[in-house]
Image: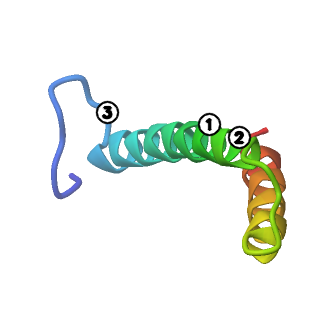
Amino acid sequence: MSKKETDSQTPINDCTEWLRKCAEIEGHDIVASNYEGLDKLPDTAKNQEMKEILRAALEETLREKG
């Protein structure tokens, strides 16, 4: 018998993995929506490097989410 079992006979590891994936997807949604808001700020000389990093991070986040 496994270390722990639930009443529904679903191993705890499966539930933990499911919760981890849900949290990861939710995290990608939060990150993407915040990046999209920041990306709408006007480009200036002071924030040009930050905006380049931001755009690359947004693309990566959306690619991982898909």
Residue 33's label in the rendered image is: 1
Q: Distance between the residues labelled 3 and 2?
A: 38 Å
Say whether residue 53 is left or right of residue 34: right
25 versus 54 height, above or below: above
Residue 60, x across and y down, in percent: 79, 58
Q: Pick the residue in front: 37 or 18.
A: 37
Residue at x 62% of width, y 36% of height = 33
Residue 9, x across and y down, in percent: 26, 30
Query: In the image, what residue type sits under mark 1?
Result: Ser
Q: Mark 2 points at which residue?
A: 36
Name the secondary structure under disc 3. Answer: loop
Cβ–Cβ under 8 Å for marks 3 and 1: no
Q: Distance between the residues labelled 3 and 1?
A: 34 Å
Query: In the image, what residue type sits under mark 2?
Result: Glu
Cβ–Cβ under 8 Å for marks 2 and 1: yes
Residue at x 65% of width, y 39% of height = 37
